[in-house]
Image: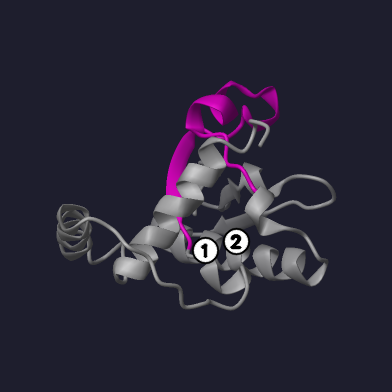
């Protein structure tokens, strides 16, 4: 899942970069982090996100209901006015979504070829064909989650 992260740049060398993950600041949760150096932003916020996801799962929170509203939304929200830089951080949440199940799916050959090419071209993003299909299904379900079934 791609998380929007707000970064507050320090005003002087004695302050750290402050970070917030608005998508994880709902109900009684809040996801914040800090880093002393720009190079530490990604590892520190990734650790904060994974720790928050673990806590949410332990509390029985349904992670499939998480929605990141995106940079434009959060930049316009007065609650996040102090955050002057915005990052997109991709965190694989599949391990928090339960056990994987093997299924049999029939797809046209041309579609499989396109999927395999995309996976090969984006090997740093997609682990394999199954990971690609799981991401595609998640995006499709998320895109239409506000519509009645």
Q: What secondary structure is marked by label 1? A: helix
Spot occupied by residue 45 in the image (x, y as percentages of width and height): 54, 59
Residue at image position (77%, 60%) is 61
Viewer-closest of 119 and 72? 119
Residue at image position (82%, 46%) is 27
Q: What secondary structure is marked by label 2? A: helix
Q: Is residue 108 left or right of residue 127?
A: left
C-beta proximity under 8 Å, tags 1 and 2: yes
Spot occupied by residue 43 in the image (x, y as percentages of width and height): 47, 66
- Indicate whether 103 appears above or below 63: below
Q: Which residues are magenta?
A: 66-91
Q: What residue does disc 2 label? A: 49
79 part of magenta stretch: yes
- Indicate whether 143 appears above or below 33: above
Spot occupied by residue 55 in the image (x, y as percentages of width and height): 75, 68
- Indicate whether 58 appears above or below 145: below
80 part of magenta stretch: yes
Q: What residue does disc 1 label? A: 46
Residue at image position (68%, 54%) is 31
Residue at image position (46%, 38%) is 86
Q: CA distance from mark 1 to mark 2?
A: 5 Å
Viewer-closest of 35 and 117? 117
Q: Is residue 124 left or right of residue 144?
A: left
């Amino acid at each position: 899942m791609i998380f929007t992260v707000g970064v507050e740049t320090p005003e002087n060398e004695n302050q750290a970069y402050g970070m917030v993950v608005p998508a994880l600041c709902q109900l009684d949760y809040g996801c914040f982090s800090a880093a002393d150096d720009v190079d530490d932003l990604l590892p520190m916020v990734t650790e904060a996100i994974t720790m928050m996801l673990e806590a949410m799962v332990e509390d029985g929170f349904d992670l499939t209901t998480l929605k990141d509203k995106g940079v434009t939304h959060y930049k316009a929200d007065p609650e996040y006015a102090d955050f002057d830089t915005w990052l997109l951080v991709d965190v694989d949440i599949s391990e928090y979504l339960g056990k994987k199940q093997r299924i049999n799916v029939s797809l046209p050959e041309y579609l499989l070829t396109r999927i395999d090419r995309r996976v090969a071209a984006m090997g740093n993003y997609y682990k394999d064909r199954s990971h690609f299909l799981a991401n595609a299904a998640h995006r499709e379900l998320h895109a239409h989650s506000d519509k009645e079934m």
